[in-house]
Amino acid sequence: MDPIVEFFILVVLIAILSYIPLVGPYIKLFNTMIHETGHAVTAILTGGRVESISLFSNTGGLAITRHRSVGGRILTLLSGYPAASLFSVFIIYGLTQDWYEQLAMVLAVILVYNLLFWVRNAVGWVWVLSVLASLYFIYTNGFMSVFEHVLTLIGGVIVIQAFLSTWIIFVISIKDRHSAGDAALLEKETKVPSFIWGFLFLFQGTVSFALALFIWFGGDLYLIVEILNYI
């Protein structure tokens, strides 16, 4: 199938599913999980610790972390949106390379680790277990076409939601800076206005989204490397 047609069908399907009660919030939690995992991993890498991750039925999430330094806390707050954006690029690249089993394994590792060590609320437990059980059932019963389509759907959801979430946080940071989530918390820590953080989230989200589309439509990554080297 032509990549443009396939992407158009994927976007339409995701748009339809997003407005179906229960289904919409369910699929959007993939992006939330990656976002919160980004916070958690960064907290550990900067010498902090993760107390819990919660996923909510309204597609929101919360990572509670503790830090030894202000710098670690700032980096942790910064990491959620870029983590989702970079993961979206990774998963799109994997899909174009037909790495379906490898991508499923990466997702499984993330989900299992979260389930065992970080996720601490009922919605999170049910969501993680249901995703793992569904992927396991589809794969072990040999429904490979369904397996590939499901992973493509998950990848598409993460790409679109990672991009849209940066737009949302940017708009909120302008209209109601105290309700701007990570951007508002960064303002509290750094005194830098939340709309600046919102813009930075939007900028990296847009670049990552453009890169994901470039890869999806058959773009050559070596061309980007050459351009960056030239610059």
Image: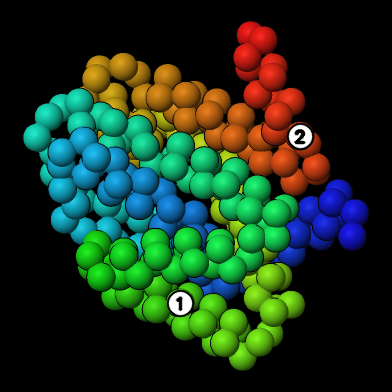
User: Disc 2 marks which amino acid?
Assistant: Asp
Residue 147, image quadrant: bottom right
Q: Secondary structure at mark 2?
A: loop
Q: Position of residue 206 (x, y in %)?
A: 61, 31
Label pair 2/1, CB-CB below 8 angstroms: no
Classify residue 219 as left or right of residue 162. right
Q: Position of residue 3 (x, y in %)?
A: 84, 51
The residue drawn where x is 47% and y is 61% is 106
* 10 Å crowding of disc 1: few (<14), some (14-19), many (20+): some
* Residue bearing mark 2: 220
Res 111 seen here = yes
The residue drawn where x is 86% and y is 49% is 4
* Residue bearing mark 1: 132
* 10 Å crowding of disc 2: few (<14), some (14-19), many (20+): few
The residue drawn where x is 27% and y is 58% is 53
Residue 94, placed above or below residue 218: below
